[in-house]
Image (spheres, grey):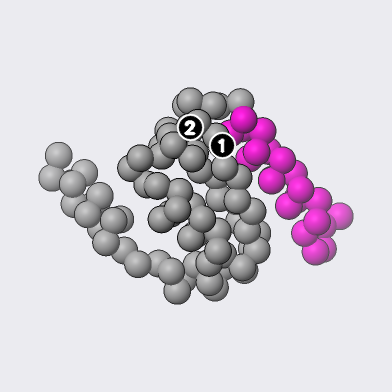
Amino acid sequence: MPVLLSTNETCIGADQREELTTVTVPALVVQGDADRSAPIEQTGRRTHALLPDSRLVVIEGTGHGLCMSDPDRYSRELLAFANAWSTCRPGRR
């Protein structure tokens, strides 16, 4: 339990806003709009705004475990993003 609490403390206290602005690859931000532990206005939307080339997908009615509450939609979004990115990469044959 102490390791879990320490890890959680580190993650919550880390400020990675500056690093996010330097990401040079497309990014997908997927979040549920009913996430109580990480509200979308404080997390997903801000992350999306900081990432230079990102796409925000909001899955309505889902919380923090959206990959469990709507796994089909979550999987579709991940696959669509991966497929779109893999077909538009420079140098791809």
Helix, strand or loop under label 1: strand
**Residue 36 vs residue 49: left or right?**
left
- Front residue of 37/20: it is 37
Tell me the quadrant of the picture where the C terminus can be found: bottom right
Helix, strand or loop under label 2: loop
Task: Please say if 26 is above or below 69.
Answer: below
User: In the rendered structure, does residue 86 fall within the stretch colored magenta?
Assistant: yes
The tag on residue 79 is none
Instruction: Residue under label 1, please give it.
Output: 59
Identified by mark 1, the residue type is Ile
Task: Please say if 9 is above or below 24.
Answer: above
Instruction: Residue under label 2, please give it.
Output: 62
- Front residue of 79/36: it is 36
Residue drawn at x 55%, y 59% is 48
Q: Categorize mark 1 by other alpha carbons within 10 Å: few (<14), some (14-19), many (20+).
A: some
Task: Please say if 71 is above or below 32.
Answer: above
Residue drawn at x 80%, y 56% is 88
Q: Position of residue 68 (x, y in %)?
A: 47, 26
Q: CA distance from mark 1 to mark 2?
A: 6 Å
Q: Which residues are magenta?
A: 73-93
Q: Quadrant of residue 4?
A: top left
**Residue 55 vs residue 39: left or right?**
right
* Callout 1 touching callout 2 (CB < 8 Å): yes
- Front residue of 36/84: it is 36
Q: Position of residue 47 (x, y in %)?
A: 49, 59
State the residue lying farthest toward the left.
2
Q: Position of residue 32 (x, y in %)?
A: 49, 39
Q: Position of residue 22 (x, y in %)?
A: 54, 73
